[in-house]
């Protein structure tokens, strides 16, 4: 059997396991990488090369910094301050909650952001006699949209950047995602304010359960202003270094990964969080999934399997399709898959294919990869599409169809915004 067919067989099995989750996602990815090595598609010494990739180190460092925000109570304190400032009116509370969720999730876990702000929002809703079901879904949707704004805001962004790097192509900078992330976030807030809120259930939630351990920890750390200040300074410092990396590199040879790890080390040394808490704050599923998919992506490129799929897709689309049309098709495919499977797995699966298709058209792959990553983050239409959606399911008293009703129009809006903004920010033929 040719290397192309062997690679496609491995990718096919990986795709099925990603969708069904019969096996943990990280196990599936690492097993796929091992299979690529055992079949001789890649040299054995490259099977675990993903674990040494600087992107993995970057993500681990930012997970620790994000974790410190919640352990010190900084995220909860910021959320409470903003929500209290905007008042307890339903519209004002919704806007304040969504803005805070988007900002926090742009530099930390959107799951952690939702978990931190949820008790705050529920408490204010209870005191203001507002149904929590009117506020919790907007919180989750804003956290999902805000994650698109930076490189480290959500796993699909990192996966897309890593796929370009693995293919030896120019990759995305830290703040480059803001070109599409900010418009998507603004569109999400405006949609919820003028359309989405009318689709939310009106039932009053009476039986609300909060994670007792998380609430106790937030309360215990709420008065530790010293650690909160250190965490805020470290976070701002790391984000500034990442945002202005090219200019800073002229004076200091620092990388994104180095900045993230330095920040994480400072937080541990200043006891803003313990070593154990730092390890627990790292999303190891994302780390190993990313590390496992990098060799598979490399195999797709080197074996010719990616080109084979690309040629087939291009042929099905008419032989010489418009890059914009291809981007639209891949957006729809990615967005459909992400409603039912991990957005990380979805991006990891489609990114190498997207690169090959773009190259077969002679187009810059950045626009296609951006569309795939953004679509993978638009997991708004089901309660299982993304962890923030699942977190608010019980406390908000939502049903499956509530997500479909509110999330589907938002996906259509994000699709339109993406097809307008992405080609402008990342031209298909820049030269």
Image: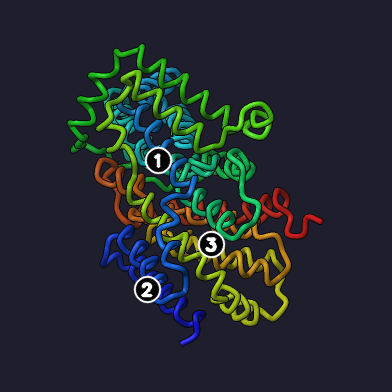
224 shown above or below 101? above
Camera-near label (2 vs 1) is 2
| Tag 1 secondary structure | helix
- Which residue corresponds to the image point at 59% horizontal and 44% vertical from the top-left? 177
- Tell me where residue 137 appears, x and y as whole percent: 38, 42
The residue where tag 3 is placed is 351
The alpha-carbon separation of the residues under discs 2 and 1 comes to 28 Å
In the image, 407 versus 204, the foreground residue is 407
- Which residue corresponds to the image point at 34% horizontal and 40% vertical from the top-left? 282
> Which colour style is shown?
rainbow
| Tag 2 secondary structure | helix
Camera-near label (2 vs 3) is 2
410 shown above or below 40? above
Quadrant of the frame with the C terminus: bottom right
| Tag 3 secondary structure | helix
Tell me whether the residue at label 3 lies in contact with that at label 1, contact meaning CB atoms closer than 8 angstroms: no
The residue where tag 1 is placed is 60
- Residue 53 in view here: yes
- Which residue corresponds to the image point at 64% horizontal and 28% vertical from the top-left? 248
- Taking the image as shown, residue 360 lies to the left or right of residue 410, namely right
The label shown at residue 21 is none
**Going by the picture, which residue comes out furthest to the bottom?**
1
Task: Mark 2 or mark 3: name the one nearer the start of the chain.
Answer: 2
């Amino acid at each position: 059997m040719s290397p192309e067919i062997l690679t496609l067989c491995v990718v096919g099995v990986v795709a099925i396991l990603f969708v069904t989750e019969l096996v943990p996602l990280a196990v599936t990815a690492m097993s796929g990488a091992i299979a690529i090595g055992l079949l001789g598609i890649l040299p054995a010494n490259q099977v675990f090369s993903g674990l040494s990739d600087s992107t993995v180190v970057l993500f681990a460092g930012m997970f620790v910094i994000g974790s410190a925000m919640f352990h010190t109570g900084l995220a909860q304190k910021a959320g409470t301050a903003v929500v209290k400032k905007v008042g307890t009116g339903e519209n004002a509370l919704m806007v304040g909650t969504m803005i805070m969720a988007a900002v926090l999730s742009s530099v930390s876990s959107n799951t952690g952001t939702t978990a931190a702000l949820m008790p705050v929002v529920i408490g204010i809703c209870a005191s203001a006699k507002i149904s929590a079901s009117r506020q919790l879904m907007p919180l989750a949707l804003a956290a999902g949209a805000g994650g698109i704004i930076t490189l480290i805001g959500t796993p699909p962004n990192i996966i897309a950047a890593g796929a370009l790097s693995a293919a030896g192509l120019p990759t995305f900078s830290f703040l480059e995602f803001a070109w599409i992330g900010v418009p998507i976030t603004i569109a999400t807030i405006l949609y919820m304010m003028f359309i989405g809120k009318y689709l939310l259930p009106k039932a009053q939630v009476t039986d609300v359960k909060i994670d007792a351990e998380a609430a106790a920890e937030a309360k215990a750390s709420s008065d530790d202003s010293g650690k909160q200040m250190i965490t805020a300074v470290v976070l701002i410092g790391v984000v500034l270094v990442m945002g202005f990396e090219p200019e800073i590199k002229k004076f200091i040879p620092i990388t994104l990964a180095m900045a993230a790890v330095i920040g994480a080390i400072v937080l541990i040394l200043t006891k803003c969080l313990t070593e154990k808490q730092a390890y627990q704050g790292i999303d190891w599923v994302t780390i190993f999934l990313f590390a496992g998919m990098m060799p598979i992506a490399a195999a797709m490129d080197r074996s010719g399997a990616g080109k084979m799929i690309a040629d087939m897709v291009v042929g099905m689309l008419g032989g010489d399709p418009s890059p914009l049309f291809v981007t639209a098709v891949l957006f729809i495919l990615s967005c459909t898959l992400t409603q039912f499977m991990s957005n990380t797995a979805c991006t990891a699966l489609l990114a190498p294919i997207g690169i090959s298709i773009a190259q077969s058209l002679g187009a810059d792959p950045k626009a296609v990869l951006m569309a795939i990553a953004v679509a993978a983050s638009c997991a708004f239409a089901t309660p299982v599409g993304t962890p923030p959606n699942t977190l608010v399911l019980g406390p908000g008293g939502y049903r499956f169809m509530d997500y479909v009703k509110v999330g589907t129009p938002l996906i259509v809006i994000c699709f339109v915004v993406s097809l307008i903004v992405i080609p402008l920010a990342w031209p298909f033929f820049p030269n």
